[in-house]
Image (cartoon, rainbow, N blue to C red):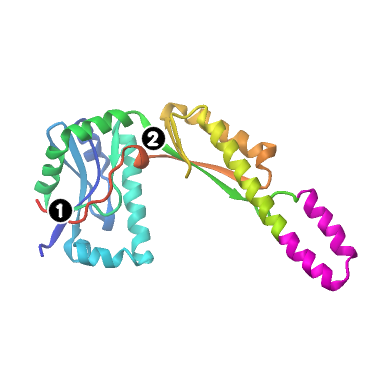
Amino acid sequence: MTGELRYLYAVANRNAEAAIAAANLRGIEGGPVEAIVEGDLLGVTSVVAASEYEEAPLNERLQDLEWLAPRAASHQEVNGKLLDLASAVIPLAFGAIYRDTDGVRELLRARADDFADRLRAVEGRAEWIVSIERDGPGAPTGGAVRALDAEIAAAPPGRAFLLGKRRDEVIREERRMRDAAVAEETWSTIEAIAERVYREPLIEDPTAGEVELGDVVRRLGASGVSEGYRVRLSGPWPAYRFGGLPSERVASA
């Protein structure tokens, strides 16, 4: 086992090298972030300890959320800052590890055409996340629940108990229908301005459309259909869904 490995965050065009170097970014475990250039591409990396990031110890630590959470946050922070330093970024999922710089260069050579195509596809673009959450107890109950409430109030204890069970079922069904309605309204409204939308939902939108997307989300949050829900927007994020790569555990040079 060698003492050090290379952790790969993302791939970008080589013209971002100077900006990345000047930014003095710090990555996982606080290590300095370095660009490794090969041809027209570069890999954004930092050095990590083999004792923690070789395949066997890493797989074990991935089950430990207390260990994983701050390191995943560092990974995301580096890639988020890269959006300000490069016009296009292909982010990798957490845990892309290479033996050394030669391993990273070999990846960039072997997939040069694929990376070039991906970078062109995400040029000037980012992902946005729109989340929908129930706000407190949720939306006001409908007529069916109110009718059951009146019936329960007038019923003897045994029947009131059974009606209470029925009331719980009706509330669950109303919530399911409301959830679907809010999700559909959000989907159709955002789809009108976004290039692509995923049901999670993840939104790909040119960064120039940030103000428009923010306005749409604010209008959704204030609309009647979303009463009892919070609609939130976060981003921009690197294009993990649209242009990102899965992690690649310790790859040989």
What residue type is disc 2 on?
Ala
Q: Position of residue 204 (x, y in %)?
A: 42, 34
Image: 196 above or below 28: above
Q: Which residue is mark 1?
A: 251
Residue 55 placement, left or right of 80: left
Give the magenta part as a residue range.
Answer: 142-168
The residue lying at 80 percent from left, 49 percent from top is: 143
Between residues 71 and 204, which one lies in front from this camera angle? 204
Quadrant of the drawing holding the N terminus: bottom left
Examine the image and state in which quarter residue 167 appears: bottom right
Q: Which quarter of the figure has residue 110?
A: top left
What is the count of numbered marks? 2
Q: Is residue 152 magenta?
A: yes
Residue 191 visible (yes or no): yes
Q: Residue at x 55, y 43 (%)?
A: 232
Residue 88 in picture, x, y percent from top left: 29, 32
Q: Residue at x 37, y 59 (%)?
A: 69
Secondary-structure class at tag 2? strand
